[in-house]
Image: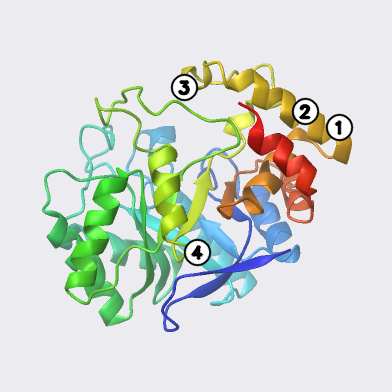
Amino acid sequence: MKYRTIGADPKTRREVSVLSLGAMRFGTVTDEPTSFAILDRFVEAGGTFIDTSDNYAFWVHGDQGGQSEELLGRWRRSRGVGNEIVIATKVGARPLAAGTSYIDNPEGLSAAVIRESAQRSRNRLGVDRLDLLYAHIEDPKTPLRETVEGFAALVAEGTVGLLGVSNHWSWKVERARSIAAAAGLPGYEVLQYQHSYLRGRTEMSTALSPDGHQGIAGGELLSYLRAEPDLALVAYSPLLNGGYVRADKPLGAEYDHAGTQPRLAALRDVAKQTGASVNQVVLAWLIGGRIPVIPLVGASSVGQLNESLAAADLELTAEQRARLDDAQ
C-alpha cells in the first residue's frame, strides 16, 4: 500500500492510504459478516482510510440512514481499532423524516444541524473526534458564513479534525474557503466528487440543480485543484458502478459523447499491455496522475476488494500514461 498526506495543518493533517474504502452499503445491502471481512482485509492490506455518511443507506429501508456508521462502530469495538484508521463521514444530506429524501427534505448545513449531526455520528462510530467531516451537499437556505463557522467551531473544540466538502459548485467551495481564511478559521481541505478516467458531461441537469451536475469533477474543479496543490481530491464511483467491465451496468447518459470510445480504446490497450484489469488501470491512472487522486472504492466481497487493492501497486509507464491522457 502507498500513502499520502491530507491536510496542511500539523495539528489535523493525516497520512492515509491512496485507496479509500467506501462503507456506504455496509449494514444494509452488505451484511455484517461480509462487511467485517471486507474491512479486515482492507486493514490487513495496509488500508487506513474509510468513508461513510450519516445518511447511508437511507434509501434501502426508507428510513434516515445511519446503519453504515453503526456497523463501523461495532467493527471498531470488536477489533480494537484506534486512531490509526481514518474514518471520514458526512453531514447535510440526511432526510429529516423517514420516507423522504435528501432532495426534498435534507437536514441541511445550519450550525445547529452540523453540531447535532456530528454528535450523532460520533456516537454511532464510537469516537470522541471525527477524523474528517464533509459538507455532503449544498444548502442554499443557510448562509455560507454560518456553515463555515459551524464546522470551524467543532474543529476548535477538538471534536472534528479535517474538514471536507462534496458535491458543491467549485465557486462555492472557493467562497467558503475565502470566508474561512479571512476569519482565520479552518476551511475545507478535502474535496469529494465523482471522478474517473472517462469524462462525464457536467452540463446535464440533476434533481439538485437545473444548472448541471455539480457532483462531477469537471474541468473547472480540476483546474482549481491544480492551482491549490494542498487540497486533496477523493474520487467516488471511480469504476462507474461496474460500467467499465459489465454489460449489465451500462454507462450513464453523461458518458454518451464522442470522447468516450477513444478513451475506452486507450484503456483497453493499456490493460492488455500491463496484464492488469481495466478497473485496475483506471485506479492506477487516478492515483498517479497529474493531479493525484484518492479513489474511493466500494466492494461487496473480499474478491472485489482484492482487485482494487492490487491497483495501488500498479505502475504505469510514461508512455502508457501519455496514451491514456491524450485520448480524446
Is there a contact, CB below 8 Å, between mark 1 and mark 2? yes
The secondary element bearing badge 1 is classed as helix
Is residue 17 shown above or below 80?
above
Instruction: Judge depth for marks 4 and 3 and give the one in front.
Output: 3
Residue kind at label 2, given as amino acid type? Arg
In-image side of 215 versus 149 (left or right)? right
Q: Nearer the viewer, residue 167 or 40?
A: 167
Residue kind at label 3, given as amino acid type? Glu
Whole-angstrom CA distance, mark 1 to mark 3, is: 26 Å
Instruction: Judge depth for marks 1 and 4 and give the one in front.
Output: 1
Q: Earlier in the sequence, mark 1 or mark 3?
A: 3
Task: Give the labeled residue for mark 3.
Answer: 254
Give how far across and how far down residue 7 sits, in percent.
45, 71
Q: Earlier in the sequence, mark 4 or mark 2?
A: 4
Whole-angstrom CA distance, mark 1 to mark 2, is: 6 Å
The secondary element bearing badge 3 is classed as helix
Identify the image quadrant of the C terminus.
Answer: top right
Q: Nearer the viewer, residue 105 or 246?
A: 246
Residue kind at label 1, given as amino acid type? Lys
Task: Give the labeled residue for mark 4.
Answer: 87
Give how far across and how far down residue 203 sits, in percent.
35, 25
Give me the residue at 72% from left, 43% from top. Answer: 321
Give me the residue at 63% from left, 50% from top. Answer: 289
The quadrant where residue 163 appears: bottom left
Identify the image quadrant of the N terminus.
Answer: bottom right
In-image side of 124 versus 118 (left or right)? right
Q: Earlier in the sequence, mark 2 or mark 3?
A: 3
Q: Earlier in the sequence, mark 4 or mark 3?
A: 4
Give how far across and how far down residue 258 sits, in percent.
56, 16
Whole-angstrom CA distance, mark 4 to mark 2, is: 34 Å
Q: Residues within 10 Å of mark 1 (few under 14, many from 20)?
A: few
The reply to whether residue 249 is visible in this rendering is no
